[in-house]
Image: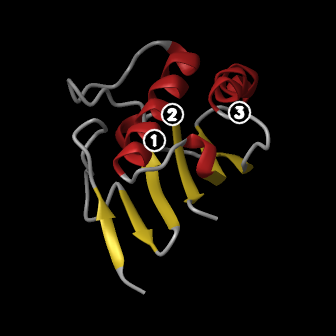
């Protein structure tokens, strides 16, 4: 099965040896996004709600480049520095994902890239 790199300037560029996303067949595997503003490269400082919104907008931009969207996401993993902020993150997350909601795991992480408070990765299936 051929793999195709998905890359867009509308989301932060990879900060290491990885792709923003890879499409394999009808599946898209999205790398974790942190709350970097793609226009400035700076971390969003709007609290966990604003940071969650930025992360999901970044994922949405990568999906759009792959001719996909959030409605095609079947699984996410949310990494948070502080699970005490779960409710606020969850409220914003719920604005982006409609039923049927993707499967999800949420874990607290000791540290995230660039000292981000949140990172989310995703798997999408299109044309299925």
Vertical comparison of 95 with 29: above or below: above
In percent of the image, x 57 and y 41: which residue is there? 70
In percent of the image, x 36 and y 83: which residue is there? 2
**Circle 1 is placed at which residue position?**
59
Instruction: In the rendered structure, find residue 56 and report the number of the disc placed on it.
Output: 2
In percent of the image, x 48 and y 75: which residue is there? 25
Which is nearer the eye, 117 or 56?
A: 56
Vertical comparison of 122 with 69: above or below: below
Q: Residues within 10 Å of mark 2 (few under 14, many from 20)?
A: many
**Circle 3 is placed at which residue position?**
83
Q: Name the mark nearer the viewer: 2 or 3.
A: 2
**Gap between marks 2 and 3, in whole Å?**
18 Å
Callout 1: SS:
helix
Instruction: In the rendered structure, find residue 109 and report the number of the disc placed on it.
Output: none
Q: Residues within 10 Å of mark 3 (few under 14, many from 20)?
A: some
Which is nearer the eye, 45 or 98?
A: 98
Task: Give the percent coordinates (x, y) of residue 9.
Answer: 22, 40
Task: Give the percent coordinates (x, y) of residue 81.
Answer: 58, 36
**Gap between marks 1 and 2, in whole Å?**
5 Å
Position of residue 98 in the picture relative to residue 126 (left or right): right
Q: Are marks 1 and 3 in contact (CB under 8 Å)?
A: no
Q: Are marks 2 and 3 in contact (CB under 8 Å)?
A: no
């Amino acid at each position: 099965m051929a793999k195709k790199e998905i890359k867009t300037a509308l989301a932060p560029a990879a900060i290491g040896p990885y792709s923003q996303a890879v499409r394999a067949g009808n599946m898209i595997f999205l790398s974790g996004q942190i709350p970097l503003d793609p226009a400035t490269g700076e971390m969003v400082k709007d609290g966990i709600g604003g940071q969650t919104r930025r992360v999901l907008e970044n994922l949405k931009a990568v999906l759009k480049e792959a001719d996909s969207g959030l409605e095609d996401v079947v699984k996410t993993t949310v990494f948070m520095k502080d699970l005490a902020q779960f409710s606020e993150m969850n409220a914003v997350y719920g604005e982006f994902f409609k039923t049927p909601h993707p499967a999800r795991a949420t874990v607290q992480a000791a540290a995230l890239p660039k000292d981000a408070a949140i990172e989310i990765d995703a798997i999408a299936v299109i044309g299925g």
